[in-house]
Image (cartoon, grey):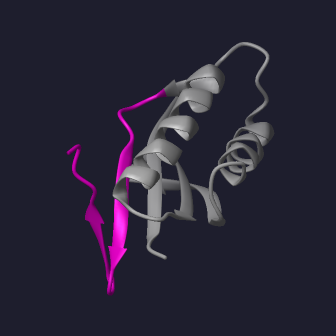
């Protein structure tokens, strides 16, 4: 089963949302749709990014999982446009919006 990675830059948290709850809530939500391999917050080019890696049947399945993650994430914080990539050998390749 292919491995996929959802990531998005995190802006301000919504009122009442504790920073410590962001990744666990997104991870728990993603687990209802897919097998989560890893989750974290990383600093990329000076900005905080939430990263959730999961498996999916195919690109469409992965898009559905990513949309679910993004939907909940927008309720918790301001986010940039999300990125969805698929692991191909030793590289992460962007998943197109077909």
Q: Position of residue 43 (x, y in %)?
A: 49, 54
Q: Quadrant of residue 22?
A: top right
Magenta run includes residue 90: yes
Closer to us: 56 or 48: 56
* Above or below for 66 versus 86: above
At x 41%, y 47%, the residue is 63
In this view of the protein, can residue 78 be seen by the observer?
yes
- The front one of 57 and 90 is 57
The structure residue drawn at horizontal position 71% and vertical position 53%, both measured from the top left corner, is 31
Q: In this view of the protein, can residue 45 be seen by the observer?
A: no
- Residue lying at the far top of the rendered structure: 15
Identify the image quadrant of residue 87: bottom left
Q: Which residues are magenta?
A: 79-98
- Residue 80 lies within the magenta run: yes
Q: Position of residue 64 (x, y in %)?
A: 47, 43
Q: Is residue 40 left or right of residue 49?
A: right
**Which residue is at the front of the view, 33 or 73?**
33
Query: Measuring 56% from the left and 63% from the top, which residue is drawn there?
Result: 54
State left or right for residue 12 relative to residue 83: right
For the C terminus, the quadrant is top left
In the shown orientation, is residue 6 left or right of residue 60? Answer: right
> x%, y% of residue 57?
47, 65
The residue depicted at 44 percent of the width and 74 percent of the height is 2
Q: Position of residue 26 (x, y in %)?
A: 68, 43
Q: Nearer the viewer, residue 65 or 43?
A: 65
């Amino acid at each position: 089963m292919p491995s996929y990675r959802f990531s998005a830059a995190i802006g301000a948290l919504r009122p009442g949302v504790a920073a410590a709850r962001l990744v666990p809530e997104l991870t728990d939500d993603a687990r209802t749709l897919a097998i989560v391999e890893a989750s974290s917050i990383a600093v990329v080019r000076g900005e905080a990014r939430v990263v959730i890696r999961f498996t999916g049947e195919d690109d469409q399945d992965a898009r559905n999982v990513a949309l679910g993650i993004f939907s909940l994430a927008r309720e918790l914080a301001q986010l940039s446009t999300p990125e969805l990539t698929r692991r191909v050998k030793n590289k992460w390749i962007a998943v197109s919006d077909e």
